[in-house]
Each structure stands twice: as structure tokens, then as C-alpha cells.
Image (tube, rainbow, N blue to C red):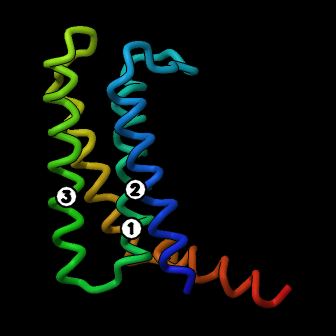
Amino acid sequence: MLRNTWLVLGWLWVAVVFYVSLMPNPPEPIHFDGVDKLEHALTYTMLMLWFCQVIVQKFSRVYLILAFVVMGAGIEMLQGFSGYRYFEYADMLANTAGVLVGFGLAHTQMGCILNKLERNAKNT
């Protein structure tokens, strides 16, 4: 497994989440009620799913859950302190829900995507 490559890409993704979450005017490509909550949930779902594929020890995944929940709450607090973004409990709830959904998906066939990509790359 290309574990180090997947980890680097995952940490870059975390950095992008921090950047976009804390920038003054984040991009908003779609406009409908609640879209930001959906964006939060999907982002944290995919982050958790990604890292669960790289970190396979069950005990370590508990730390992943805690880390991403704390990350989501921390970003919300930083947004509240920024003066140009808003603190919202609903965003923290959406982040946490995303983490839990990602954890659940990691126990399905979706939790093997990176391994399948590597196998397909080796077979070509």
C-alpha cells in the first residue's frame, strides 16, 4: 500500500479544509438552504473515510474520530474569533455527523477504495 502517499494527500486535504474554512470569502458554488451543512457533513465524511483506509487499527480509528470532531469544533471556534466568519453549533453538528458517517462507510466496500486503486494500478 502507498500508505505514505495517501497520508500526505490526506494531510494536504486537512490543510485545505483549514484554509477554506478560515478564509474571509470562501467559494459558494451552489446556493440553497442548508447547503453549507451538507458541505460540512460531506467534507468530514470523506476525510474520515480517507483516513480510515490508511489507518486500519481499530483503536487508532477512535483517535481519528476524536481528532476530526475536535478539528471541526476548533475550526468553528476560530471562525467565531475571526471577525469575518461565524461560529455555528449546527456546523459542528454537521461535522460530527460527517465523521460518524465516514466511520460507518469505512466498514463497507467503500472502505477499500484506496486498496482497489492500487491493485488496478499494478494490473495495468
Give the image location of residue 25, x and y in percent: 43, 13
Q: Is residue 113 left or right of residue 107?
A: right
Q: Position of residue 55 (x, y in %)?
A: 35, 78
Furthest residue in direction right, as rendered: 124
- Spatial distance from mark 3 to mark 2, Cα to Cα? 11 Å
Which label is found at residue 67? 3
Mark 2 vs mark 1, CA separation in Å: 6 Å
Disc 1 target residue: 51
Q: Residue at x 35, y 30 (%)?
A: 21
Q: Residue at x 66, y 82 (%)?
A: 118
- Above or below 77: residue 17: below
What separation in Å lies between label 3 and label 1 (alpha carbons)?
11 Å
Which quarter of the picture shows residue 51? bottom left
Say whether marks 3 and 1 touch (CB < 8 Å). no
| Image quarter of the C terminus | bottom right
At which x and y percent is residue 20? 42, 30
Crowd rating for badge 3 (residues with CA inside 10 Å; few <14, some 14–19, many 20+): some
Q: Are marks 2 and 1 in contact (CB under 8 Å)?
A: yes
Element marked by disc 2? helix
Q: Where's residue 68, x and y in %?
A: 24, 54
Above/below status of 109 relative to 19: below
- Under mark 2, the amino acid is Leu
Callout 3, which amino acid?
Ala
